[in-house]
Amino acid sequence: MKNKPETPEVKANLVEPVKPAEVKTKAAKPEKKRGHYAQKECPYCHKHFGNVKNHILLVHKVEAEADGRLKELTKEDLIKTGPKQPAPLTPEDKIYYCIECRAKLRKGENPCWHCGAQLIWEGIE
């Protein structure tokens, strides 16, 4: 048998890819974005930070040592047993949230530290 020379038309037919049958797949869900740390207020300078303990160690170390906030844990502190009684909540300990951005606030804080919204605190005990 003799091989026939291939014409360009025949080559084009041979090279054309075969289309696979469409398969239904679930739509890929978008990846969740990582959230930000909850912003907490520094008890010394009243600025908000994601890692307040680190901020206190770097900026307010002398003040924190005087207050006893930087007390190191001992073996006895870790071994203590028994349930710890939570302290009763005072009005200053209650957590309030901004209406606009849901940032954590103290009572009477105006404007919101996060979005700057003016808040009305009348009628809140």
Image: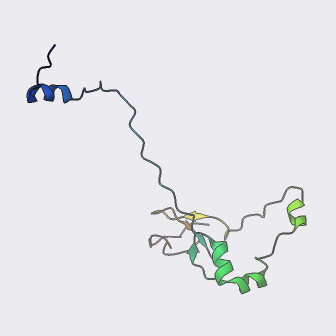
Q: Is residue 90 above or below residue 68?
A: above
- Residue 82 location, quadrant: bottom right
- Compare residues 105 and 32 and report the one nearer the observer: 32
Residue drawn at the location 65% of the way across and 81% of the way down: 58
- Residue 104 location, quadrant: bottom right
Q: Position of residue 98 (x, y in %)?
A: 50, 65
- Residue 87 location, quadrant: bottom right
Residue drawn at the location 52% of the way across and 58% of the way down: 35
Q: Is residue 24 left or right of residue 16?
A: right
The N terminus, quarter of image: top left
- Compare residues 22 and 74 and report the one nearer the observer: 22
Q: Is residue 61 left or right of residue 34?
A: right
Task: Identify the colour scheme used.
Answer: rainbow
Judge whether residue 95 can be spotted in this image: yes
The C terminus, quarter of image: bottom right
Q: Residue furthest top?
A: 1
Residue drawn at the location 71% of the way across and 83% of the way down: 61
Q: Position of residue 122 (x, y in %)?
A: 53, 70
Q: Position of residue 49 (x, y in %)?
A: 57, 73
Q: Position of residue 31 (x, y in %)?
A: 45, 48
Judge whether residue 43 can be spotted in this image: no
- Compare residues 75 and 117 and report the one nearer the observer: 75
Residue drawn at the location 20% of the way across and 29% of the way down: 15
Q: Residue furthest front?
A: 1
